[in-house]
Image (tube, grey):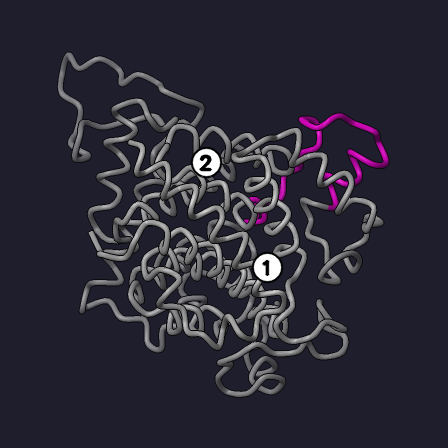
Amino acid sequence: MPKTSLQNRAAGAIMGAFIGDAMGLGPHWYYDLAELRRDHGEWINDYTEPKPGRYHAGLKAGQLSQAGFILELTLRSLVERDGYDEQDFCRRLDEELFPLLDGTPICGPGRYTSQSIREAWRRRVQQKLPWGQTGGHADTTEAIERTLAIAVRYALHPGQLAAHVSGNTILTQVDDTVVSMTVAYCVVLGMLVQGYRLDTDLSGKLMQLVISGKLPFHAVTRPGTQPPQPGDPDPPRVGRFASPDALLTPSCIAAAAADPEIRIEPAWKVSLVYGMPCAIYHQLPAAYYLAARFHDDFELALLHAINSGGQNQARAILTASLVGAQTGLSAIPQRFLDGLENSAELLKLANALAAKVAEEALER
């Protein structure tokens, strides 16, 4: 395992996500790469201001989108409640976010409200439904963009991590595949915070957690993905997720990133290989690829995620969090912290959460 401290990695994962969000503010959702280059130059290497008429128009370089706003809300709840408190999290959405929304896309913090949050707002505010009946069917990474903070907080406790991330996700997204992939990403992030690498061995370690009953996925093969033999009992179902495939994907992608015969050059073209759209099944492979290939270079991972167009903001959040967890906060270039609005307060929150994780590690 790398020598980077647990606290450093935990803080790096959180601040990486905030930086990725703010980096995506200006060049967000350009599906025409020629238009992206025309508006933002051949290579984006810093925070940029959204152009008039774009999704976050009116905001300034270095500010957070609504995804960052909700991540900060989640982080504050985790720090102030000393762990995940669903009632407190929902109260904060009711009191701090939903009064700022009107159910339309171009509204609220960050100037844009995502599909799943708009649906939750309609069910909660207009239809007066209780939390637990508010989730919709958006197939995006919106839940990951906030639950990654929960993953960091419970990095040492994969069972609690999976339970809390799953419970939080279904508040806004109820599709089982989306929930499964969201939990899988968060479990991967938790492993990286512990000190593991996003490499070809990681999925095997995750499957050991499944087999031991610590993760709620169904093991369909013998250990090492060996086929079942005659007379073998059906593996016990330890949780709600029917397949472990979301846990196997990261190492498959890492193998491609490490294979000299498989090259995506330049790396930003990962979006053309795995897809530019918002759906979680496009976003996760690209994030895993960049986080495995640039596991020790936060800047390159982030910039290739940003310069790849499409839903580059989500790609940057996911990638930068994974790489920040591997390099640690200390390896994030200072200019990204300096250019991030309200960086000092965000760092304070990230360090408070990271300190709690480190404290628990010492008690084990």
Residue 328 drawn at (x, y percent):
35, 60
Res. 246 visible in picture: no
Disc 1 marks a residue whose amino acid type is: Glu
Q: Name the disc covering residue 50, or none.
A: none
| Whether residue 119 is situated above or below residue 37 in the rendered picture | above
Would you identify the image quadrant in which residue 68 lies?
bottom right
Percent coordinates x, y for residue 321 in the rendering: 44, 57
Q: Dot 2, how many residues are within 10 Å of its Cα: few (below 14), some (14-19), or many (20+)?
A: many
Above or below 103: residue 269: below
User: CA–CA distance between discs 2 and 1?
Assistant: 32 Å
Left or right of 288? Residue 113 is right
Q: How many marks?
A: 2
Q: Which residues are magenta?
A: 118-143
Which residue is identified by label 1? 345
Q: Quadrant of the C terminus?
A: top left
Q: Which residue is mark 2?
A: 180
Circle 1 crowding by C-alpha within 10 Å: few under 14, some 14–19, many from 20:
few
Residue pictured at 26% horizontal, 62% vertical: 257
* C-beta proximity under 8 Å, tags 2 and 1: no
Q: Is residue 170 magenta?
A: no
Tell me the mark number nearer the camera, choosing from 2 and 1.
Answer: 1
Which is more N-terminal, label 1 or label 2?
Answer: 2
* Quarter-of-image position of residue 184: top left
Residue ID at (47%, 50%): 281
Left or right placement of residue 63 versus residue 78 in this view = right
- Which is more toward the observer, 329 or 104? 329
- Give residue 69's quadrant in the image: bottom right
Q: Is residue 25 left or right of residue 91?
A: left
What kind of secondary structure does the magenta stretch mostly adopt?
loop
Residue 308: percent from left, percent from top: 48, 72
